[in-house]
Amino acid sequence: MNQPATILTFPTRGARPVTPLEDPTALLTVGDLGIAGGGGRELVRGVSFSVPKGGTLGIVGESGSGKSLTCRAILGLLPDGLKVRSGAIRYGEQDLVGLSPPGWRALRGIHLAAVFQDPGSYLNPSISVGAQLVEALRATLKLDRVAAEDRAITLLKRVGLAEAEAVYRKYPFELSGGMAQRVLIAIAVSANPQLLIADEATTALDAMVQAEVLNLLDDLRREQGLTLILVSHDLAVVSKVCDQVVVMRAGSIVEAGPARTVLSDPAHDYTRSLIDSHHRYSIDDGDLTSRPTAAAAEPQRVPALLKIDSLHASYRRSSHPSSSVLHGIDIELDKGEILGLIGETGSGKTTILRSILGLVTPHSGTISFRGKEISGLRGRALRALRLSSDIQYVHQDPLRSLDPDLPIGASIAEGLDIKGELSRHERAERVVVTLEAVGLDPAFAARRPRDLSGGQRQRAVIARALILDPAILLLDEPVSALDAVSRTHVLDLMRDLARDRGIAQIFISHDLGSIAGIADRVAVLYQGRIVESRPTRELIDQPAHPYTRRLLDSVLRLEDDRPADGRLALPTN
Amino acid sequence: MKTGFLRGRSASVALAIVIAVAILAAFGRWLAPQDPIAQNPYAMLQGPSAAHWLGTDAFGRDVLSRLLAGASSSVLASVFSVVIGLVFGVVPGMVSVFLDRRIEWLSLRFIDALMTLPFLVFAIAMTAMLGNGLIQAMFAVGILITPAFYRVSRAATLSVVNSDYIEAARLMGASTTSLIRRHVVRKVLPPVAVAIASMMGACLSIVASLTFLGIGVMPPNPTWGGVLATDLTTLYERPLGPLAPGLLIVATVWALNALADALRDADACPQKVRK
């Protein structure tokens, strides 16, 4: 295919003269890519970039900006109904647009590989990890069974799984999120691909595991000359790992250039707003200094709104295989207070919330709300408590917590509907008011969950809780799946709700930046115990427990200079 | 159902056949060119002719008229069975998921027991006990297809009962009835629609079998199975006689099953979700 050289330059937008990334030795070149869906709706247009061999390119942008679609087009994996409408994707000398299925089979796995978000869903739950690796190796490298098994173990060791033989025999549901992501990386790099596309590969992981996985990718890059395309909504991740960065919005590139320059001195307003949102909620948040310290937050005379006293519980949920156990949890929550809850996967954060909600019956200990014992309630008493709607829960995944068949408005009104207090007309009015309160257009009431972006869905879920005027909101990772801009909107909302309406909140997040930005106090949960619980600022300035220190040390900051050897600071155990 | 379920050609053909049969069932009696039970001793066992398109049987009755007039009793009997199955299967299937463990276990074992009963034998036994009539026989068949609806609606309910939105509704104090009404029914309807189409096919062939055996219908009244049975006795005189009723039964049963497949495939298409 003849491509004029000019097609490889960036469209001129923003103040900065566009730096062409093209390079005769580029491994991958995307030129003027356009992707359209049914009805000719353009989802991606005029996207051009190139990655040299051994280079690292970061693609950042909010959800729906077309960054994942661009990557899927490179891999030939566009969803049904979407097509590359214009432009070219060249891998070396080969044009990838319109490649035949045998052509793709020769490329995928061997030349191009990918790792996606949510590693669990990309592994077959009924086949052991080893068997899945062997399957990949036999397909790509045509190894015999024995050689493939040998190489599988080597690969598992290569991705930093110390007990490779044990992991080899395990099933995906027996792995933690970090381990599963490593296994996926092992499968992806099993045939020594040239180009690895990591699409939000570390988004669901906590700071420590994230740093480990990023280091692993970086090692692979340096040792095997792997070329990396990293898609992330987390600017800090991109700034750590990538040389070049492309900022996308609404299907086109708004800015591109060397990562350091773009992220420290953005030319485009949109890039600036992304960076501002990032700083708004980070552990270096300027606002923290104005937050009351321990001395200011004097113990109050009034009894706490919610009091948990030496709670012991164990719990196993079908969808969460790791059973978590709580050993004597004490928590107090006052009106209008936001308590941040942090801790690694399986440390029992969610179990605490579920105990408060009566979904887990504690072995011992008490939970009292407004001085009344609520733990161990059953049947009518539990339902009466729930109908009083004082305590509301916001699930982790907004898409799964909305009925896909119901319009947003019906989902939001559900609580009122169940109580049956208001007329249909009054309910509709309340829905409008609540949608406005969470910053959504009232027109959203008629839409289905799938027509909303991730951030909008999360606000809809919060609206469903708010419409019932609760005293306490329990939030389980409400912002972990959101990009920087949506995250800022949701966190601002939560902060206003605490301040203006006095809604107390327990807020679980693995993102320390979010916790630092809104929590008044932080409790650190480690192996089923609260190892420290102090005012946010104090905790971040002087972490006492070794686990807290390690967690804080692994947080990626946007400003940090990249160390000479490319390694991220990784705390030792 | 969803738009686009008629993508395959077989689905369109199946739908056309089902509609045609439905029209026959409704108006067949009036479409019949001659009286379906009028005997004509001067025109027995004739081949196809202008007067009798599909020929006449051993009593000189017009076969085409008998098939057209027989459509309504065959189809209505199947509909009756399916309605019995729906009534006793769908709601209990949904509710079973929310029941106390022991009651749930008992209901499942009861359904398992029903599944072990053979259709024809049970239907014949019922007519022996309650009197020979299509209603009695098809009531028995309806009871026996209850497990299909029970299982389908229970499976669809199970797939959503652990979802976060059901839990969210429970946390707001929703009762089981309102959970089913608001969230479960919509999820259960598509697979139940598939089950209706495939059970209609099954019931139709059972009706044909029963009437072929002479169960459920008094002799002069026409049914598809009955026409097939009388035609078979005169195979020697009219070798192509059983072809018309046989093809009619096969085509209808195939069309209902093909329709069920098309509905299932349309429902299985994942709806696109914006990331």
Image: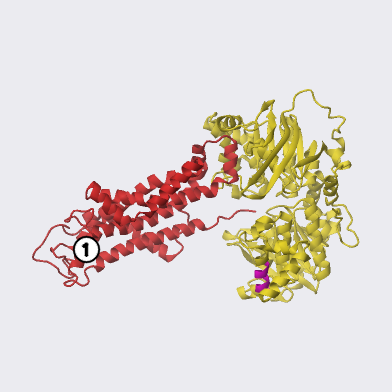
Chain colours: A yellow, B red
Residue at point 88%, 30% (across, down):
A295
Q: Is residue A5 magenta?
A: no
Residue ID for mark 1: B229
Give the side of residue A444 with respect to residue A217, left or right.
Answer: left
Q: Residue furthest right?
A: A564
Q: Position of residue B178 (x, y in %)?
A: 50, 37
Query: Does residue A187 appear left or right of residue B94 in this picture?
Result: right
Check the image and report above or below for B10 versus B188.
below
Q: Quadrant of residue A33?
A: bottom right
Residue sitting farthest toward the left:
B42
Kind of residue at disc 1: Ala
Q: Is residue B179 left or right of residue A79?
A: left
Is A378 above or below relative to B214?
A: above
Give the overall secondary structure of the magenta segment: helix
- In this rendering, the count of numbered labels is 1
Using the image as rendered, state which of residue A294 and residue A307 is in the foreground: A307
| Residue A376, picture quadrant | top right
Whether residue A111 is visible to the viewer of this picture, yes or no, is: no
Q: Residue furthest top?
A: A301
Front residue of this view, candidates A51 and A299: A299
Identified at 69% across, 38% down, the residue is A474
Instruction: Determine whether the residue tagged by mark 1 lies in a helix, strand or loop.
Output: helix
Which sits in the foreground, A488 or B114? B114
**Residue at the (11%, 66%) spot, across then down:** B43
**Bounds of the magenta span?**
A133-140
Q: Is residue A242 visible?
A: yes
- Where is residue A246? Give x, y as percent: 77, 60
| Res. B70 image quadrant | bottom left
Where is residue A132 shown, x and y percent of the image? 65, 66
